[in-house]
Amino acid sequence: MTTASASSDRLAIAARDLVKTYRGDVRALDGLSFSVSPGAVFGLLGPNGAGKSTTVKILTTLSRPDAGGAEVAGIDVLRHPDRVRRAIGCVAQKSAVDAEATGRENLTLQGQLYGIGGRELRSRVGELLERFGLADAANRIARTYSGGMQRKLDIAMGLIHRPQVLFLDEPTTGLDPEARADMWAEISRLSGEGLTILLTTHYLEEADRLARWLAIVDRGRIVTEGTPEQLKSELRGDAIHVELAETNGHGQVRDALDRLVDVREVVLDGSSLRARVDSGAKAVPAVLAALESGGVKVASVTVARPSLDDVYLRHTGRSFSEADEGKESSR
Ligand code: ADP
């Protein structure tokens, strides 16, 4: 899939050792590399501030790296940015839809920007309106559209010139759960049609569902990559999550658990205690007994198969939600 050994002319995206520093001190990208095979849905998953948007900006020619290079659709982004722009579609976090124009007008204008016109453009606009279920709303101004409809119009605009690679930067941020599920189905459908999609997200569930290949980004680097299943199966055993009745007393909790050899990778965050064990069913009674004898009150306990959150924790030492809020771990 995304092996570095694959010949670069067969790749839809190749990013090599990208470095980008803002204002001299914020190192947004710190040697980030990955590659994407044609037709794949590739997910860049990372908490806020990890460097995902900076990566997308470089690959879509909106920003230049300080070091490193990249090709998209086999074209060098630094040497031929105009050619790259014709080969890609971009759906940025911030909508490109003109709220005062109709859906049809938005698509038509977008097509004209790419030099498409006449009958070809009318037919392409009609096709996309149908394709995204917007035909009935085509002549209404976009301000009257729901959030989900506006996002679909954004994607339709990104596809007007039949790009080979589509960049979706946080495609479901701000959507309600129903619109998000609808968008997931749409993205899966696009991928089924052979389009290469690079998707950035800070939603673990979204990455798990959509990405055929996933790279986890942390502090400007890829910390691990693989299929979501591969990444989870590398983690041995189960994850246990104990909700403590109180948020303080972390020292007491650690003392109580220190005696249990089977309990690994303990992370405490407020009232939440997470750890990895070989067998959840065996470990839970021992953990509860140890906490009780240490004077720690427990509100609830759950056991789960490894999730992408656990994968992230394993590779970065922080839980995803902690990193997403920019907090430091209490380890
Ligand atoms: P993500 O998309 O994963 O949330 P970004 O690529 O937006 O991450 O940001 C990576 C880091 O670079 C963050 O620390 C962010 O604050 C910083 N950053 C991004 N854009 C700028 C900018 N234009 N000026 C200064 N710092 C920036």
Image (spheres, rainbow, N blue to C red):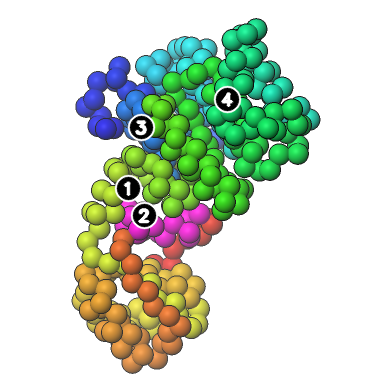
Given residues 42 and 315, the one toward you in this image is: 42
Q: Is residue 83 positioned above or below 41 on the image?
A: above
Residue furthest front in the image: 136
Judge the density around disc 3: few (<14), some (14-19), many (≥20) Cα neighbours within 10 Å: many
108 sits left or right of 71 in the view: right
Residue 237's tag is none
Mark 2 or mark 4, earlier in chain: 4
Q: Residue 233 in magenta?
A: no
Magenta region, main secondary structure: helix
Q: Position of residue 263 (x, y in %)?
A: 26, 73
Q: Nearer the viewer, residue 22 or 171?
A: 171
Q: How far apart are the two marked residues, 2 and 1, measured between alpha carbons?
A: 7 Å
Residue 93: tell me if it is visible: yes
Query: Which of the two labelled residues, at mark 4 and mark 3, occupies the earlier sequence position?
Result: 3
Whether residue 154 sits left or right of residue 331 in the image: it is right
Query: Which image quarter: residue 134?
Result: top right
> Dot 2 corresponds to which residue?
308
Q: Which residue in the protein does label 1 denote?
A: 228
Label 2 within 8 A of ligand 1 by Cβ: no
Q: What residue sits right under mark 4 in the picture?
A: 128
Residue 180 x %, y %: 54, 47
Which residue is label 3 attached to?
40
**CA distance for labels 2 and 4:** 34 Å
Q: Which residues are magenta?
A: 307-324
